Image: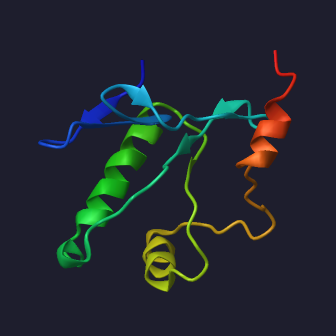
Amino acid sequence: MTASARTQNSGLSLRCGKASRSDTPCSSSFILRFRGAPDCFLDDLFVRPSSRQHGIGTALLKHVAGIAWREKYFCMRWEVLDWNKPAIEFYNNLGAVFLEEWKPSILIGDALEAAAKGAV
């Protein structure tokens, strides 16, 4: 079982590899084949604008990084939209590396349905 943290008054459970509300998984980690070790995918991190500039985002990200480090995950990863300059600057200041050569992929809607046809 991975380390976890439960935020007060939200019912949100954060686990490296899974984020869930009422124990219903909504995200999971995958194995990086070239490293043979799991990564920690951070599905979403949002701090309300009125609460920014108080170290909350940094504290949250460092908390999840601590879980990933203790659990011996290969890395911690997330995605950020290219127009979100404040977030990009925030992640740069933390030492994040942006992988320009990797392209996020998604199956959604009709394409997801078509790919699912014939699944075992």
Q: Residue furthest left?
A: 9
Q: Examine the rendered structure and indicate whether residue 106 appears above or below residue 81.
A: above
- Estimate the x, y position of residue 58 in percent, counting from the top left: 31, 64
Give the side of residue 69 with respect to residue 107, left or right: left
Question: In the picture, which quadrant includes the C terminus?
Answer: top right
Percent x, y for residue 30? Answer: 65, 34
**2 to the left or right of 7:** right
Quadrant of residue 67 within the rendered picture: top left
**Which quadrant would the N terminus be assigned to in this image?**
top left
Say whether residue 10 is visible: yes
Left or right position of 26 against 34: left
Q: How far across and how far down the image is residue 66, in percent?
A: 37, 44
Q: Nearer the viewer, residue 42 or 105?
A: 105
Residue 70 occupies which quadrant of the picture? top left
Q: Residue at x 44, y 55 (%)?
A: 44
**In this orientation, which residue lies closer to the viewer: 76 or 14?**
14
Report the residue at 47% width, 81% height from top: 89
Instruction: Say whether residue 34 is visible.
Output: no
How many numbered marks have been drawn onto this rendered protein structure?
Answer: 0
Residue sitting at x 43%, y 83% = 86
Using the rendered view, name the quadrant where residue 32 is placed: top right
Residue in the picture at 76% in, 42% down: 112
Colouring method of the image: rainbow
80 in relation to 67, above or below: below
**Could you say where residue 100 lies in the image, as x and y percent from the top left?**
75, 71
User: In the rendered view, would you say 86 is above or below 7?
Assistant: below
